[in-house]
Image: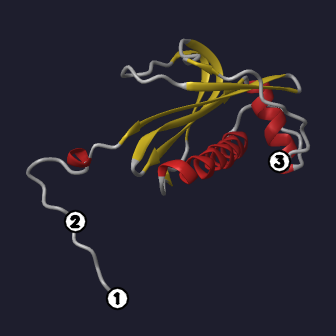
Amino acid sequence: MMLGIDMQPGEPFLGDSAGTESGVLALVGLAGPWVGTGSMSCSSGLACHLASRMLMTECAGINDEVLDAFAEVANMVIGNVKTQLEAKLGAMALSTPTVIFGRNFETRRVGSREWVSVPFPCEGGAINVQVCLAEAQSDMNFRPGFALPHTVQM
């Protein structure tokens, strides 16, 4: 909405679009009683278009401004997903987005958890949003042999 682009979600599906990709991919970690990753990806051209709309200037190619804008959009999108999930799963936190871009890079998902994928067709392509969550295991919060951190009380 803030970019002035009409987007309606496509049909959600279980699975992911991992494989050989080209374009821009943002990854955002989720932590709390449930942990996992959210991702958003699209073509380089669409990432430039989104950044142009967000920054209100013409972005001709991938540069730091485009990557920062894409990271911010991914943070907002995955943040909205997180807010919806919190109503059922409890409080969660987001990591700082990590953005990857290029041609012919390969992504792999480790583990057997299913990803929920939703394509968002829009001007000049599609934005793909994916989330994978698993219930946190309390015994994995800290590495064995390391003391629990102390809290500071004010």
Residue with the most extreme left position:
145
Secondary structure beneath dot 2 equals loop
Can you tell which of label 1 and label 3 is closer to the viewer? 1
Distance from the alpha carbon under mark 1 to that under mark 3: 40 Å
Distance from the alpha carbon under mark 3 to that under mark 2: 40 Å
Name the residue: 44% across, 21% down.
109
Task: Specify the amino acid type for callout 1.
Answer: Met
Q: Quadrant of residue 147?
A: bottom left
Image location (x, y in percent) of residue 123: 89, 27
Q: Which numbered disc, 1 or 3, marks the residue that appears first in the sequence?
A: 3
Secondary structure beneath dot 1 equals loop
Tell me if mark 2 has few (under 14), some (14-19) or many (20+) residues whose alpha carbon lies within 10 angstroms of its own.
Answer: few
Judging depth in this view, the residue of 134 and 75 nearest the camera is: 134
Tell me if mark 3 has few (under 14), some (14-19) or many (20+) residues whose alpha carbon lies within 10 angstroms of its own.
Answer: some
Name the residue: 69% across, 40% down.
70
In the displayed structure image, the side of residue 63 where residue 26 appears, left or right? left
* Residue tagged 3: 54
Task: Specify the amino acid type for callout 3.
Answer: Met
Q: Which mark is residue 149?
A: 2
Quadrant in the picture for the C terminus: bottom left
Image location (x, y in percent) of residue 22: 64, 17
Q: Which numbered disc, 3 or 2, marks the residue that appears first in the sequence?
A: 3
Name the residue: 86% across, 22% down.
124
Q: Which mark is residue 45?
A: none
Residue with the most extreme front position:
88
In the displayed structure image, the side of residue 80 where residue 58 appears, left or right? right
Distance from the alpha carbon under mark 1 to that under mark 2: 16 Å
* Residue tagged 1: 154
Task: Specify the amino acid type for callout 2.
Answer: Pro
